[in-house]
């Protein structure tokens, strides 16, 4: 499947088959950080806890003057109807060739492969950028669902980071 990148109103939009990742600019992130839907229709009415946290990171980066477009939070949307089912994105812009991803699905969006599709699309886009050579991700030891997502995408477990399990990806399997 081919990843298509475009821009809509200054925001990066990544589309791959049934999945659309729509960048949430700082003004959108401000609403999401408060648990509000922003301009999106959410499958469960409002964004999930992880998406709220990711939006807060984007908002903090903007407030600190270090926000870079394309390297924040994205809404995970079903391409067919653009309903938001979760959030995914980067913990900030690349640093020394490395970028970290995270993802979160609304309760009603779980169990259908959306997190795997979103993580794979983010990694495909990130590894296609000249300043990225490694994509990182961390999970809590008990979060088997998230670990399975990372394994399906092709991540390899590396040295733990404190209490978190750490994974890295340098290329996507064919």
Image: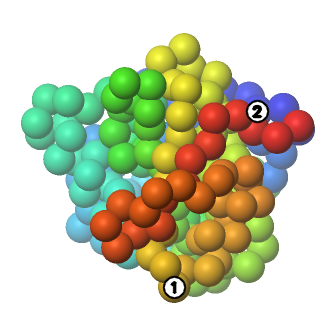
N-terminal of the pair, mark 1 or mark 2, is 2
Q: Residue drawn at (21%, 40%), measured in percent from left and top?
A: 61
Q: Residue drawn at (51%, 25%), measured in percent from left and top?
A: 132
Q: Which mark is residue 94?
A: none
Where in the figure is residue 126, as x and y percent of width and height? Answer: 57, 31
Where in the figure is residue 105, as x and y percent of width and height? Answer: 56, 71
Between 46 and 91, the one nearer to me in the picture: 91
- Residue pointed to by mark 1: 142
Q: Is residue 43 left or right of residue 102?
A: right
Between 104 and 162, the one nearer to me in the picture: 162
User: Total marks drawn?
Assistant: 2
At numbered mark 2, what does the secondary structure look like: helix, strand or loop? loop
Where in the figure is residue 15, as x and y percent of width and height? Answer: 71, 39
> Which image quadrant: the N terminus?
top right
- Residue pointed to by mark 2: 3
Q: Is residue 109 visible?
A: no
Q: Is residue 16 left or right of residue 36?
A: right
Between 68 and 84, the one nearer to me in the picture: 68
- Observer-side mark, 1 or 2, equals 1
Where in the figure is residue 28, as x and y percent of width and height? Answer: 33, 48
> Which image quadrant: the C terminus?
top right
**The quadrant where residue 112 appears:** bottom right
Q: Residue drawn at (76%, 33%), measured in percent from left and top?
A: 3
Residue that protrudes farthest toward the front in the picture: 159
How many residues crowd around disc 2 within 10 Å: few (fewer than 14), some, or many (20 or more)? some
At numbered mark 1, what does the secondary structure look like: helix, strand or loop? loop
């Amino acid at each position: 499947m081919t990843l298509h990148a475009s821009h809509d109103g200054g925001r990066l939009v990544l589309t791959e088959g049934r999945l659309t990742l729509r960048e949430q600019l700082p003004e959108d992130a401000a609403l999401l950080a408060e648990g509000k839907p922003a301009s999106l229709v959410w499958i469960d009415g409002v964004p999930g806890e992880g998406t709220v946290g990711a939006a807060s990171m984007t908002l903090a980066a903007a407030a600190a003057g270090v926000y870079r477009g394309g390297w924040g939070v994205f809404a995970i949307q079903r391409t067919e109807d653009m309903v938001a089912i979760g959030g995914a994105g980067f913990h900030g812009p690349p640093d020394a060739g490395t970028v970290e991803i995270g993802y979160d699905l609304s309760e009603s969006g779980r169990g259908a492969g959306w997190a795997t599709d979103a993580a794979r699309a983010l990694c495909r886009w990130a590894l296609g950028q000249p300043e990225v050579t490694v994509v990182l991700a961390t999970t809590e030891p008990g979060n088997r669902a998230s670990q399975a997502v990372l394994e399906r995408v092709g991540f390899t477990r590396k040295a733990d980071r404190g209490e978190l399990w750490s994974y890295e990806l340098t290329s996507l399997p064919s």
